[in-house]
Amino acid sequence: MPSTKLTTPAAVRQFLDRFDFFLFDCDGVLWRGDHLLPQIVETLTYLRSLKKQLLFVTNNSTKSRASYISKLSSLGIPAEIDEVFGSSYSAAIYISRILSLPADKKVFVIGEKGICEELEKENVRWCGGVEEDIEDMQADVEDDLEVGVVLVGLDRGINYRKLARAYRYLQREEVVFLATNIDSTFPAKGGLMPGAGSMSAPLSYMTGRTPVSLGKPSQEMMKAIEGRFQFDKNRACMVGDRINTDIRFGQEGGLGGTLGVLTGVCKEEEFLAEEGVVPEVYLDRLCDLLIAKEE
Amino acid sequence: MPSTKLTTPAAVRQFLDRFDFFLFDCDGVLWRGDHLLPQIVETLTYLRSLKKQLLFVTNNSTKSRASYISKLSSLGIPAEIDEVFGSSYSAAIYISRILSLPADKKVFVIGEKGICEELEKENVRWCGGVEEDIEDMQADVEDDLEVGVVLVGLDRGINYRKLARAYRYLQREEVVFLATNIDSTFPAKGGLMPGAGSMSAPLSYMTGRTPVSLGKPSQEMMKAIEGRFQFDKNRACMVGDRINTDIRFGQEGGLGGTLGVLTGVCKEEEFLAEEGVVPEVYLDRLCDLLIAKEE
């Protein structure tokens, strides 16, 4: 069934009344690249005034929760660290608490600072990552038996040596293959750019292995959120711009509702498709929720 | 049917008598990385003494035919430029002669020197490639309407910006997506390393498009070889170490025979599989052909 657009104050009000907990995708919903979308602060303030609990759920693996708070605050969005749930944090929790990686093992990271910071917060040893950027490209690629996990996120410093090292480690079957998320692209100011999934794609092609993803739409991320927060799923709503990540994440996770916005990747015709996953309702922009306020 | 191992001088002699034209894969057959395999020069000299025509058919896109001759000669293998057929050459021919790329269009290259050299020999304009290595990583990624082809080969200088640029161009449907070859890995001295197919894999993941491959086992390469050489396919034999590239290439191309060797990627059990593609006959090492000479 196609999605329904919320067009009247009454429809928005009725929609908002059904939920206590809103999970927000960020890039493409609140901002695009470094550019805040219109009236986002007002909209979030309005939701807080209605006593809604907010959670910023992002697949962006380049920032730790702490740096996300800085980003939110630089854009004028007040938020607590416990209101941020990123795929790097999700991966760090998975490694330390679900995999219970032994102390003599470490994680080889293809990714940026956010991943390394979250791993350190969970006391997980790592190598590669930001350090690898300055490593000698000509050095031999040798196996390292301490590596027990290869974790791949978005890495704008990706290079041949990192791929070769990850491939070397993944040839050992016991090495766990994880991805912060498998988005093929992400929306930046100038257009779509290669995403974390495009960093793990060559490794999948080489090894025939598929990484366990710790970001949307993987339910591993939903499990981690449920482990951290007490909430009634029926009264929770996922808000996002992408059908394949955000909307699927909410629907497969059994949340009470999903809200799509058109400020990111997906186009209106995708929300209006007769078949496949579509958000329950949608808006042109998140700030259109503010029509409920006007009278 | 499983492959048969040639074990006696008589069997080898009978096998050799059936062919006038031998197509050789190089890496894993003649050498591995920079290390010549045993008695290769003697074996090739022996074949030449039997008046066999030799063609070195390689998916290695990093070298032009001219640099391949240097490599062969540095290893003590005398060869003419017309005895070398590389995937970069194959791609350059495809672009200039099959696609007939207009003079106002150019090729965006992800790849190394060999590709750029072969394109220049065919008077094809290119950008990216080796030049991109020194480009400003922070510069904006903008579309360039002159780009009519994205050509991807092995690029040990692969970086995020190259992927982002290729992705930007490939979003235009009319831009042709080519790969010198799609090998996921290649055998180097220290083990398997990421191959050309691992450079195009993220682009396929992002665009949903599959590149046309100009290397083995693609029959586009066989067509190019047939366009260059007059030979009786029934009296031609493909020699290689990889089932999925070399052996398939020979069999799908309708050559009279295929010979596998165990000095590269594939293992004996793969040649002895009951099902799927296997070489008609195989040897431990290419130089085992020399048993036909001894007596």
Image: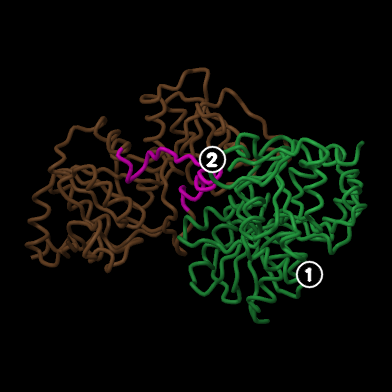
Chain colours: A green, B brown
Q: Find numbered disc 2 in the image and state the secondary structure of the residue it sits on.
A: helix
| Camera-side mark, 2 or 1 | 1
Find residue B102 and report its horizontal and vertical position in percent.
47, 18
Q: Please state which amino acid type lies under the numbered disc 2.
A: Thr
Q: Is residue B104 left or right of residue A88?
A: left
For the N terminus of chain B, the quadrant is bottom left
Q: Please state which amino acid type lies under the numbered disc 1.
A: Gln
Q: Is residue A76 left or right of residue B282?
A: right
Find residue A162 and report its horizontal and vertical position in percent.
60, 58
Mark 1 belongs to chain: A
Q: Is residue B228 left or right of residue A175?
A: left
Number of labels in the image equals 2
Q: Is residue B159 visible?
A: no
Mark 2 belongs to chain: B
**Bounds of the magenta segment:** B195-219
User: Which residue is more in the foreground, B234 or B229?
Assistant: B234
* Residue that label 2 marks: B207
Q: Residue furthest bottom?
A: A103
Q: Which mark is residue A158?
A: none
What crowding class fits label 1: few (fewer than 14 Cα within 10 Å), some (14-19), or many (20 or more)?
few
Q: Find numbered disc 1 in the image and state the secondary structure of the residue it sits on.
A: loop
Find residue B221 and report its horizontal and vertical position in percent.
32, 38
Q: Mark 2–mark 1 contact, CB under 8 Å?
A: no
Which residue corresponds to the image point at 30% horizontal and 39% vertical from the top-left?
B219
Which residue corresponds to the image point at 25% horizontal and 58% vertical from the top-left?
B276
Query: Does the magenta run of residues contain B215?
Result: yes
Query: Does the magenta run of residues contain A217?
Result: no
* Residue that label 1 marks: A230
Which residue corresponds to the image point at 60% horizontal and 64% vertical from the top-left?
A178
